[in-house]
Image (cartoon, rainbow, N blue to C red):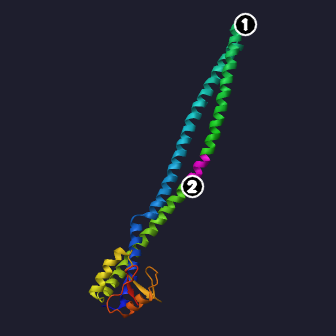
Amino acid sequence: MGTPSGLLDLQAIDTAIDRLDARKRALEGEGELAAARGQAELAERELGELRLAIDTFDRDGAKLEHEIDSLTRKAADEESRLYGGAVANARELGSIQHEVDNLKKRRSEREDELLVVLERREDVERRAKEAEERATELRSAVDHVAGNATRELESVGAELVTRREERARLASGIDPELFELYEDLRPQKKGVAAVALIDGVCQGCHEKLSSVELDRVKRTEGIARCEYCRRILVL
């Protein structure tokens, strides 16, 4: 059987490799980058919706302005008839006056509506400006995260190569029977197959071995196993 300390060294390297592999998968899966992109896309959608609202206000405003102009012209034409002297009939003059008053009333209503539209447009335009600034910041953040992710991925890849070379060197010096058991246990024990036994306590499950079991473990010439978690024990 290989030296127990060598097995613990191998376990430490395998734990490091597992962490690096997990980080590599996260980077390749663009976890942080996807989150940053998601936030940027959300800001872009909000900005797009606000710009669409502004366009709607512009159309509504233009329509109201056109209607106000039309009502103003009609009122002016009717007033010309009212005061031009061409109409002398009192009843007809009263009808014209009523039409002028009605046109001016409708114009005043449209002017009030236009004021509301312009006020709402101003508020949305302010929000759109804030949203545009936020979207710009988030796009910059995406570029920053993407650059960091690329650099970290290169660093993780290089460290994995080094660690795996070191693992191969250590594994070659471990007893084949012990190594086979270790490899079988790792998937079952969340990657941790070999642990130290310190003061009678298994460092894998943190259970304290009974005095009888501890004595047996110390005297065994074979592979020592924890009576609780069945991991390989290294004294």
For image coordinates 66% across by 21% down, the residue present is 103
Report the predominant secondary structure element of the magenta stretch.
helix
Q: Nearer the viewer, residue 94 or 53?
A: 53
Residue bearing mark 2? 133
For image coordinates 60% across by 45% down, the residue present is 124
Sequence-earlier tag: 1 or 2? 1
Q: How far apart are marks 1 and 2 (CA)?
A: 64 Å
| Residue 127 x, y percent position in the rendering | 60, 48
Q: Dot 1 surroundings within 10 Å: few (below 14), some, or many (20 or more)?
A: few
| Above or below for 114 versus 87 | below
Report the amino acid beneath label 2.
Glu
Query: Where is residue 154, by image quadrant?
Result: bottom left
Magenta-colored span: 125-131
Report the amino acid beneath label 1.
Ala
Q: What element carries label 2?
A: helix
Q: Which residue in the rendered view is the most extreme toward the top?
A: 89
Q: Nearer the viewer, residue 41 or 118?
A: 41
Residue bearing mark 1? 90
